[in-house]
Amino acid sequence: MSGIAEVAALAGVSKATASRALSGAGYVSEATRARVTDAAEQLQYVPSTHAVGLATGRTKTIGVLMPVISRWFFAEVLEGIQAALLERGLDLTLYQAPPATAAREKILRELLVRKRIEGLIAVGLEPTDPEWERLSALQKPLVAIVGSSPRASVVAIDDDHAVRRATEHLIALGHRRIAFIGGDGRADSPQVDRNRFAGYRDAMADAGLSDSIAHIHSPVSLPGGYSAAVDALAARDRPTGLVAVCDEVAVGAIIAARRLGIQVPGELSVTGIDDHEYAEMFSLTTLEQRPRLQGSSAVELLLDHIGDPGKPAVTVNMKARLIVRGSTQALGVSAAARATRA
């Protein structure tokens, strides 16, 4: 691979001049810059990010922090972030930082301090106060995806709006025994889980159904939704509608219902939030939150902050779109009657 010396020799300039021409740091005439650029293209020379960073003070690298990478939402957000960065010729440094782990402590205390990044995107991180202090000490622009904070700009869906839509959809279909499934209900549980349960609770109260509010606690996962639904749906006074904290929990509940011989949607209507890749397969009625768009929007917002360090923090709340599929129907409408009307 050719180096800066070969580029300089081909262009007939010094290494310092070639470096200035390619990095944009310092004055170089347009004619010289064009000659150096043409030489670099001929030699297929690509300047290292580290070298450019030393010359210009810019590393063109964005840090991304996530508590988990393997789950659908986080993987989709990451794809959106990477695509937006690649379009702009920027690099990405990814850290998985699970809550309350030694790895997370090391990342926040040491690695981020050593790494020369221009800005940081935190996805579903929900930092503690001491962690916020460490992030603030970096003095780098920060954008969060999911959650809310006066200390950083945030990109997220409007959780209250999404869960209200899901709950109101079931109420409009005549359901009254509607339960919320997902999350453990603790005060220190993830903010998104608490926000979504609150939206469900408020929608039920607004409809005069406060006495029917029920929270089926479960891990926020497909197996968690399955296990919790098996117990809840085996009860004599089981709900006729479920509002799930996310699509994975909803799909787990649908599988549980089928194994118990409960027809979905004939005897049980289920809604989710995500529009997960499994949603169409299970004909799941859900709220589409478009995580890739959240990722690309976070990149745009972060670059605005990098370009204007004085820009105040903002919150971008995206509205999720209701997608009605075959997991919900009017209460009391049999599958046969539904097919006849169709």
Image (spheres, helix red, strand yellow):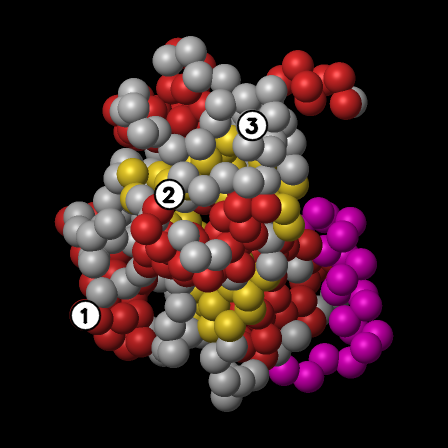
| Viewer-closest of 261 and 116 | 261
| Residue 75 at least partly seen | no
Q: Secondary structure at mark 3?
A: loop
* Mark before the other along the chain sequence, 2 or 1: 1
**Amino acid, disc 1:** Pro
Image location of residue 52, percent across then percent down: 54, 66
Q: CA separation, marks 2 and 1? A: 33 Å
Q: Is residue 310 left or right of residue 88?
A: left
Image: 136 above or below 246: below
Which dot marks residue 332?
Answer: 3
| Residue 311 at least partly seen | yes
Q: Which residue is mark 2?
A: 180
- The answer to whether residue 44 is magenta is yes
Q: CA separation, marks 3 and 2? A: 21 Å
Image: 284 above or below 37: above
| Viewer-closest of 216 and 218 | 216
